[in-house]
Amino acid sequence: MKIVCLDADTLGNDVDLNQFFSKFGEFISYPKTEAKDTIERLKDADVVLTNKVLITKEVLANTSLKLICVTATGVNNIDLEAAKEAGVSVKNVAGYSTSSVAQQTFANLLALRNQTSYYDSYCKSVEGWAKSEIFVHLNKPIFELSGKSFGIAGLGSIGKSVANIAKAFGCEVCYYSTSGKNDNNEFKKVSFDELLKCDIISIHAPLNADTKGLFDEKALLNLKNGATLMNYGRGGIVDETAIARLVDEREIYFATDVLETEPMRADHPFLSVKNKDRLLLSPHIAWGSVEARKRLLELVVKNIEDFYQI
């Protein structure tokens, strides 16, 4: 068979895709693919691997694909109706990144509330600790997680993992079900208004009709002073303009791994935030630990093997 990967760069440049897929036959990998090149690159391909490249009705009509392997959980880049009509199977991968996202959530939370970047820079500066007259430097306050109320928006597999870690830190954990359908006996279920009263709020929900704009300006204004909001779900759930303004106007901390438009816009309001020590950004990496990406590719291989009954 012929397998084509359209956007290998999204899987990291430290991964040798050949070791996973060359055993199936001809394997061609492209770092990135523009929409205008998709059809030509998929000519004669049996299987396509795509993370974000769109597989549209036009692409399906002009190729002879048999299987679309999405190297992610979300399949919003695939015209599923057109694929069904064309008899092309679509396989995604779920559950591979739970540990990775949960770990990054706390890595960023601790970095933000313990001001690790500031203290690291202070110690490495020749004008910093090396010039101090006392053994300690406490110019930026640090805060314990123990005893804090920790609210989770979206108690799926990742949300549950985050909840258990928060509990181990001594937090009082509760959750808000964004769909209204999730009932969990281990953690307290709260309304959205109650969630907004928490010391720490961590978002682990998909972007859909229930969550788009959920944390709008009105909701954000109800956050308590000293609160930390984190988004590890999807961009579009939090009003980015409003939270950027709030970080400067009040003692509100915000960490996010996702933005509504990715990559980041050159005129994004986060780039103009004055209180940068209250804002922590990461470029959609929470899912991408070395181990998670290995699991992802192994599961893509299994999807191919199952489809062809190898």
Image: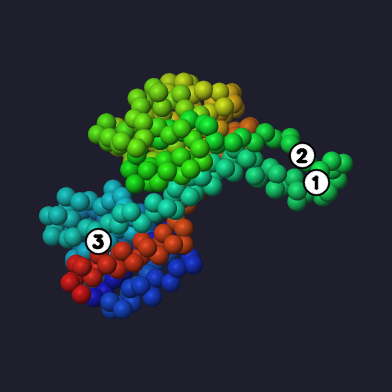
Look at mark 2 in the image and give the residue it sits on.
Answer: 137
Kindly identify the residue that appears in the image at 26 percent across and 74 percent down: 2
Cα separation, mark 3 vs mark 2, equals 55 Å
Q: In the figure, 70 relative to 268: above or below? A: below
Inspect the image, locate mark 3, and give the three-letter code of the amino acid beneath it: Ile
Q: Earlier in the sequence, mark 1 or mark 2?
A: 1
- Crowd around label 1: few <14 · some 14–19 · many ≥20 (10 Å): some
Q: Is residue 23 left or right of residue 294?
A: left
Splitting the image into 4 quarters, where does residue 163 fall? top left
Look at mark 3 in the image and give the residue it sits on.
Answer: 68
Taking depth in this image into account, of 178 and 53 the one nearest to the observer is: 178
Q: Quadrant of the N terminus?
A: bottom left
The kind of secondary structure element at disc 1 is helix
Look at mark 1 in the image and give the residue it sits on.
Answer: 129
Residue 229 shows in the view: no
Callouts 1 and 3 close, C-beta under 8 Å: no
